[in-house]
Amino acid sequence: MDVAVSIKNLGGEIDAIASKSDVHRALIAAALGTDDCRLIMNTSSDDICATVNCLRALGAEIKKDGTDLIVSPIKSAPKNAVLDCGESGSTIRFLMPVAAALGVDSVFTGRGRLPERPQSCLLNALSVNGCKTSGDGEFPINISGCLQSGIFTLPGNVSSQYITGLLFALPILSGDSEIRLTSRLESRPYVDMTVSTLKMFGISVAEKNNTFYIGGNQKYVSPKEIKIDGDWSNSAFFVACGALGHMKINGLSFNSVQGDKVCVDIAERMGVKTTRGDDFAEIEKGTLHGTEINASDCPDLVPVLAALSCFAEGKTEITGAERLRIKESDRLSATAELIKAAGGDVSEMDDGLVIYGGKPLKSEFTVPSFNDHRLVMAAALLSRNSMVTIKDAQAVNKSYPSFFEDIKKVGGEYYVVNDR
């Protein structure tokens, strides 16, 4: 589906969608829990559906009630299961250790760029601790045997998702375990989210000197319901829209452990005026100027912040984002290509981008989506004074199926050019 979009007349009020990161974690914890648990949420996405389907394959019952999900935990795991992870890196990396801990001989499949994304570090850690794994991460991935407690050694700078998967799995093993990181943990807020979810279900984790300590024989005690956080990662698009107009985003908590709430701090450094409420963020246009952004703990923000930087006077330098090259696309190269197609001034570094903003962009241009939801949102932001045609814009369904309809609510417009 190709979509033409323009957001020339910005302003309004929008409700944040449910945090995809929060839903993934709550689903898995609830599936390992003691009793039924309701997840109160206002939307779903392709990635969330992938996790739901995989947990069903592992023996959980998950029903929809409106937009809420009701999770009945795994009572008896199957001997064998096929888990189709779609294009979701979170799903496969969170659930490979969980399936292994449950003793399920599993086949993991996926599509898009997921088969190209690195899995070998996690698979090596599983194979050292009792599992048999196929190859070096080539799809399909086969994992058999039962995971054993012990020492798990992993790099901290490849994917925080490896650590999250182990943190979910290790508490249900019979013995104590340690996750030892051989390098600094990047994207730490995502691990903090995991630890917060575990605590909600009564699971204890300790951390000291780059090592996580996880006691065995723990039980996931399910709360009756969980209200899912509003999604700061996807709301960053509307924060950026507010920087170019005026926007109120409801359902966002500044007390959230989501690291991407830093998008408001970055917008303020760029000259934006903000109001921080108990359950909302209000963003008002200011005189935008460039800034320096270290994205090592907030890599998902890079495409939208780079697009916003095109409208800021002067130089914006984004660093600490080398891991973006192994996401749904090579997000650094893809973001640079978007900005160049729009007529912006951008150069690419090994770990980031340099954008010189303030120059007029083209009034009309066409860009690919790179099959990447974050790139669709960045391209839409570049339509501030333009009409942008985004090819294969359905990629946004990975995390935000209502994205284009929500754009209309704040003064934007879009139409489908080609629904192939």
Image (cartoon, helix red, strand yellow):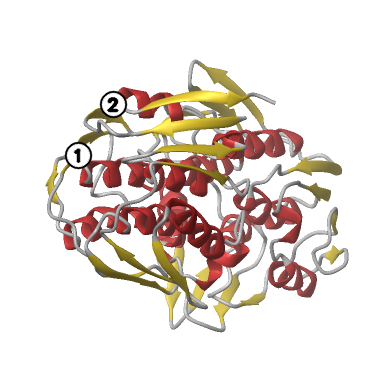
Q: Is residue 204 visible?
A: no
Task: Pick whichever of labels 2 and 1 is earlier in the sequence.
Answer: 1
Marks 2/1: CA–CA distance? 10 Å
Q: Is residue 91 visible?
A: yes
Q: Where on the picture, by quarter, is residue 325? A: bottom right
The residue nearer to you, when weighing 365 against 215, is 365
Q: In x, y percent, where is residue 127?
A: 80, 70
The residue nearer to you, when weighing 196 against 90, is 90
Q: Quadrant of the C terminus?
A: top right
Q: In x, y percent, where is residue 128?
A: 77, 75
Q: At x 54% / y 75%, what residue is drawn?
A: 156
Residue 30's label in the rendered image is: none
Marks counted in the figure total 2
Q: Amino acid at mark 2?
A: Gly
Q: Which residue is mark 2?
A: 411
Q: At x 54% / y 60%, what residue is drawn?
A: 331
Q: At x 45% / y 62%, what residue is drawn?
A: 299
Q: In x, y percent, where is residue 248?
A: 20, 34
Decide: is 191 above or below 395. below
Q: Which residue is mark 1?
A: 245
Q: Where on the picture, by quarter, is residue 169? A: bottom right
Q: Quadrant of the N terminus?
A: top right
Decide: is 334 above or below 397. below
Q: Amino acid at mark 1?
A: Gly
Residue 128 lies left or right of residue 203; in this view the side is right
* Crowd band around label 1 with a 10 angstrom C-alpha radius: few (<14), some (14–19), many (20+): many
